[in-house]
């Protein structure tokens, strides 16, 4: 007898098929989850009802494919459904038998029902033109068949099915312009869907798969052979005790699941109970993914709810600065939306994310402390991301990351932490000195470095484009301010030397003013005592350094932000007296010297020359006299 869905159920069914589910593949996850629920119910009842005998070893889910008839069949030997249950559970959309069962059992019992909304079954209509559900309940001697083609309605009639449990037969749609429905009749496509979404269902999922068996080696002849295979793992690796899992098992899991060719650098496991209950298995890769620093890279951990994959990459579980971490999180108490495709952002999710962040931080701290060589290898690959996290979001997370970042030390000639820098500071040193540049070698030859080294103060060499932004966000560490030695107001000379240079600048103010007008690009020209052997250097005023200017210039939008530069001339170098003499005797040659000295300073700072041909001609003109 044909029956109609209620009008509201019709609208909901149409909405579900066309709107609620965005990924057709998940229908199999829903049907397998329902089958697992049915087996759970039967097993639970066998524990409380002595009349029900169940062999736990025989509980299973079967998947069969018939390409000729275009059917995909999912069979379970769970509790089955009576005629009334078929009517109530399938005839009324959003009427969930699983939810009703869960509400009626003792909540302290160790049973987990995956399906709660009563809508997952109908996702199968996305790929099916007709669905038959044949079921025999543990509580009935009769079996029944429920049949529907979708919103047109459904029918229920008696069946001769004699096995306790439920068989769902999907009549797969024909291919159309938008979908390849034939995929759902391909045994290895279905197997992969099981592995992706339902690999950790606790009961074996069996399929008959075609094996290509070599029958004649000399003729290289193969014969197709059908074999029943359990296609799911059942017990997740993260639910096992760490002591029971070998390093090879972790490595193989990582390589297989995350398609890497190299074993991970670090394995992180955790099992948390309390306000936020979850288990996780995370990995720090040994190298950056090829697309890591591109817009195509997607961060996130695979999120499971009771062993069923809900999201392949849940970005909310990882902060951006830990986006390199890969892994899985499995929780039993996360509220899901109606389609289970999208996670509801709740306090539980935030608590899990916070706990995961703390766990990763502690593991990195332990690696830094106890496995320094391994940490430095990690930092070489992902240190930029940590430093990015320091200054991102206006430095909100800087205190979480400041002890994890490393910089090259001039004194130690290796990477050190900020804590290690502070511990090795000289007794009379009150600041942390740093300087930016393109490479260690180029920085080491900068004129400004010489004076600081003479004082035996350590200098942090910043070679990564994010370094100076991170330092600027930190502002200080352990009460010690960061000082950029390329700033024009940094001078470690004695008070006597400072007074001398101050007098020199005052006496030659007209010379310096005229030189500034000749150069135009600089905000100031002055004599300095900070340089030892070098004739000139280019320093900066304000917050934007020369290296920051280079970063801004390299951005796609070519942001017009420039450093306010100062040309400093070593008052103790012979060139200082030379330009003083020229200023009095030969203004034309003085102008040429000014341009040459400025060009030298720019080249030392790693800046290009606007007109290198002009400078080349000026140099030739000067040295030829």
Image (cartoon, rainbow, N blue to C red):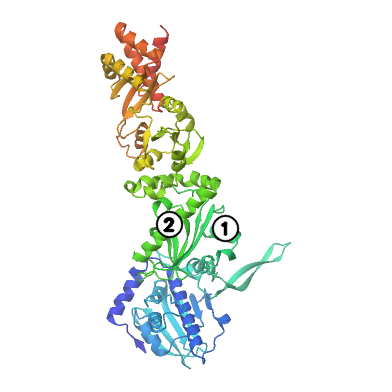
Label 2's element?
A: helix
Could you classify mark 1 by the number of other residues whose Cα lies within 10 Å: few (under 14), some (14-19), or many (20 or more)? some
Label 1's element?
A: helix
Could you classify mark 2 by the number of other residues whose Cα lies within 10 Å: few (under 14), some (14-19), or many (20 or more)? few
Q: Position of residue 438 (x, y in %)?
A: 44, 33
Q: Position of residue 292 (x, y in %)?
A: 45, 49
Closer to the camera in the image, 39 or 167? 39
Q: Quadrant of residue 488?
A: top left
Tell me the residue that label 2 is attached to.
Answer: 358
Q: Quadrant of residue 570?
A: top left
Can you say whether 331 is above or below 51 in the image? above
In the image as oriented, which residue stretches furthest toward the right? 218
Can you say whether 315 is above or below 545 in the image? below
Label 2 vs label 1, nearer the camera:
2
Q: Position of residue 285 (x, y in %)?
A: 51, 52
Can you say whether 583 is above or below 152 in the image? above
Measuring 41% from the left and 50% from the top, which residue is drawn there?
A: 321
In the image as oriented, which residue stretches furthest toward the front? 427
Question: Real-space Cα distance between discs 2 and 1?
Answer: 23 Å
In the image: residue 442, left or right of residue 207: left
Closer to the camera in the image, 144 or 382? 382
In the image: residue 157, left or right of residue 258: left
| Residue 528 shows in this picture | no
Q: Quadrant of residue 560?
A: top left
Tell me the residue that label 1 is attached to.
Answer: 251
Marked residue nearer the N-terminal end (2 or 1): 1
| Residue 188 shows in this picture | yes
Closer to the camera in the image, 568 or 160? 568
Q: Please identify the quadrant where the N terminus is shown.
A: bottom left
**In the rendering, which numbered label is found on residue 347?**
none
Measuring 59% from the left and 61% from the top, which residue is drawn there?
A: 249
């Amino acid at each position: 007898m044909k029956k109609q869905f209620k009008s509201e159920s019709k609208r909901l069914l149409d909405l579900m098929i066309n709107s609620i589910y965005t990924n057709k593949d998940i229908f199999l996850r829903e049907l397998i989850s329902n089958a697992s629920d049915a087996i759970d119910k039967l097993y639970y009842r066998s524990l409380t009802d002595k009349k029900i005998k169940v062999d736990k070893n025989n509980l299973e889910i079967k998947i069969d494919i018939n390409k000729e008839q275009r059917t995909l069949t999912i069979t379970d030997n769970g509790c089955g459904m009576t005629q009334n249950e078929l009517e109530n559970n399938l005839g009324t959309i959003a009427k969930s038998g699983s939810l009703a069962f869960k509400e009626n059992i003792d909540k302290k019992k160790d049973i987990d029902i995956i399906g709660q909304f009563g809508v997952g079954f109908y996702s199968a209509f996305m790929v099916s033109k007709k669905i038959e559900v044949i079921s025999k309940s543990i509580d009935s001697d009769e079996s029944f068949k429920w049949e529907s083609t979708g919103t047109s309605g459904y029918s229920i009639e008696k069946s001769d099915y004699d096995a306790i449990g439920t068989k769902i037969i999907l009549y797969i749609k024909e291919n159309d312009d938008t979908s390849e429905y034939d995929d759902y009749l391909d045994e290895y496509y279905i197997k992969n869907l099981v592995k992706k979404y339902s690999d950790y269902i606790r009961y074996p999922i069996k399929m008959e798969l075609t094996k290509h068996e070599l029958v004649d080696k000399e003729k290289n002849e193969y014969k197709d052979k059908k074999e029943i295979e359990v296609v799911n793992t059942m017990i997740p690796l993260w639910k096992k005790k760490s002591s029971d899992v070998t390093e090879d098992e972790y490595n193989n899991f990582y390589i297989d699941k995350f398609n890497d060719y190299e074993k991970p650098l670090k394995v992180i496991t955790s099992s948390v109970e309390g306000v936020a209950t979850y288990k996780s298995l995370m990995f720090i890769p040994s190298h950056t993914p090829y697309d890591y620093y591109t817009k195509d890279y997607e961060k996130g951990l695979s999120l499971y709810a009771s062993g069923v994959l809900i999201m392949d990459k849940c970005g909310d579980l990882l902060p951006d600065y830990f986006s390199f971490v890969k892994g899985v999180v499995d929780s039993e108490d996360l509220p899901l939306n109606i389609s289970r495709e999208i996670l509801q952002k709740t306090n539980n999710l935030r608590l899990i994310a916070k706990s995961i962040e703390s766990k990763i931080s502690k593991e990195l701290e332990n690696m830094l402390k106890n496995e320094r060589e391994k940490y430095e290898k990690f930092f070489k690959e992902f240190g930029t991301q940590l430093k990015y996290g320091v200054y991102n979001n206006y430095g909100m997370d800087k205190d979480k990351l400041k002890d994890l970042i490393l910089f090259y030390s001039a004194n130690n000639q290796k990477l050190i932490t900020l804590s290690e820098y502070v511990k090795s500071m000289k007794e009379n040193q009150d600041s942390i000195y740093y300087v930016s540049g393109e490479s260690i070698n180029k920085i080491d030859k900068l004129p400004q470095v010489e004076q600081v080294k003479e004082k035996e103060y350590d200098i942090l060499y910043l070679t990564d484009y994010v370094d100076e932004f991170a330092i600027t966000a930190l502002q200080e560490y352990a009460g010690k301010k960061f000082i950029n030695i390329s700033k024009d107001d940094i001078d470690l000379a004695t008070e006597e030397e400072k007074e001398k240079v101050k007098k020199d600048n005052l006496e030659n103010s007209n010379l310096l003013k005229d030189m500034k007008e000749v150069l135009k690009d600089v905000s100031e020209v002055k004599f300095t005592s900070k340089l030892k052997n070098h004739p000139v250097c280019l320093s900066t005023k304000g917050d934007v350094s020369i290296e920051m200017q280079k970063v801004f210039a390299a951005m796609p939008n070519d942001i017009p932000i420039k450093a306010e530069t100062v040309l400093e001339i070593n008052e103790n170098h012979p060139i200082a007296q030379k330009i003083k003499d020229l200023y009095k005797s030969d203004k034309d040659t003085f102008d040429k010297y000014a341009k040459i000295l400025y060009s030298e300073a720019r080249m030392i700072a790693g800046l290009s020359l606007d007109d290198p041909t002009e400078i080349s001609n000026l140099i030739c003109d000067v040295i030829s006299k």
